[in-house]
Image (cartoon, rainbow, N blue to C red):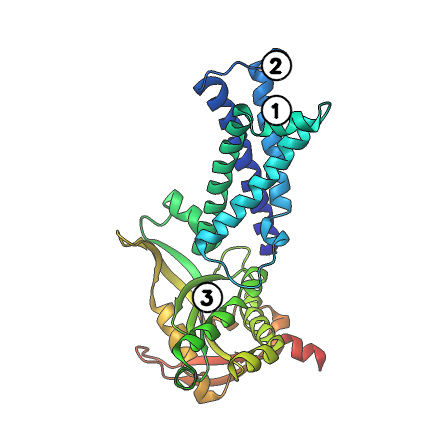
Amino acid sequence: MLKNKLKEFSILFSVLYWMLAGSYLVIVRYFGLGEFAPPDLNYGDLAAYAVLGGFSIGLLFGLFPLSNVLRFKRRRSFLSAVLIGTACYVLFFVAVIFVSSSIGNSIDFALSYVFSPDGLIVLFHLSMSSALYHFILQINKKFGPGVLLEYTLGRYFAPKEEDRVFMFLDLKSSTHLAETLEHVTYSRLVQDCYAELTTPLIDYKAHVYQYVGDEVVVSWRMNRFFTASNCHEFFYAFQERLGAKRDYFFQHYGVYPQFKAGAHCGKVTVAEVGEIKTEIAYHGDVLNTASRIQTLCNRFEKQLLVSESLVERLHDKDHVLVRFVAEAELRGKETPTKIYTIENPWVDEDR
């Protein structure tokens, strides 16, 4: 599962980051600042302790991320998330320094060491390392898992071809809702809807390409790990999460939001575009076709419509959920496109 792979990647990143941070502290203190190592330790021992300490801290932070400890009732801004995370880690390091220095010593000695020049140098370094750590985590969150690494490595600096699935999800009756609700209230409704995408995105290996008003474009890369059933299961998992908050939506907005979706797959070109503002953009007929399939949902009164090319990638067991809808004339297409719907797999199991 992607969820496990993301967890493993976050642990690996945390461990490597804090091992580097520990090594950097040794280099700055004992080479850059010219401090002398304790008489019972040589520089090799210090380096080993720094790497071992960084490994332990990184493993701890990777296994128990701050997001699992602090459960905020509302979304946090980028700056506040970085500051809160840094403050929590600084308090943790103060406690660690205090406890370690109190072993075999008095509490007064431990307190004096924490706020001594030596202790403050260590604490300052760990504070800056914590701030950078949370800054990177928030940047990665804003870009989406793995996208920051692709930017850094310049993977799409030159255009490349990829096989991808694109799904366009659109809020039903969005014009009516926007007219009924105040602008700010409507925006909060859209925010709350998109917040429910998080778990399905992780569970079904999806990647958000774009948010366009009340529409979101989701994508899957069709590599050897790709499973076509993830596409419709993702959509219905999202619907289930919205359904679980039905009472919440009626209480706060007086409406229950529902989404419709269209999906198509094929070859696209992906490239990093822009100079002042850059992003990874996808080009090709696949996106246009997926968008136009989504617009047919109201006409055929279906929540989810997909193309024949995506249906062909489903396993045999998933074909029992597939229902042919029509051969539709799509703008820009010379031949009709066969459109299908895929039923909710969990509803069928209940039946």
Q: Mark 3 points at which residue?
A: 218
Give 305 or 319, whichever is nearer the viewer.
Answer: 305
Please identify, in this view, whether the residue under mark 3 or under mark 2 is nearer the observer. 2
Question: As drawn, is 332 to the left or to the right of 229?
Answer: left
Q: Quadrant of residue 162?
A: bottom left
Q: Is residue 307 visible?
A: no
Q: Name the residue under label 2.
A: 41
Mark 2 neighbour class, 10 Å CA radius: few under 14, some 14 to 19, many 20 or more: few
Q: Which of marks 3 and 1 is nearer the N terminus?
A: 1
Where is residue 286 drawn, in percent x and y?
A: 38, 68
Marks 3 and 1, Cα distance to the nearest angstrom?
45 Å
Type of amino acid under label 2: Leu
Give 292 or 130, whichever is nearer the viewer.
Answer: 130
Where is residue 98 drawn, in percent x and y?
A: 64, 32
Q: Residue 49 carries which label?
A: 1
Where is residue 127 drawn, in percent x and y?
A: 51, 37
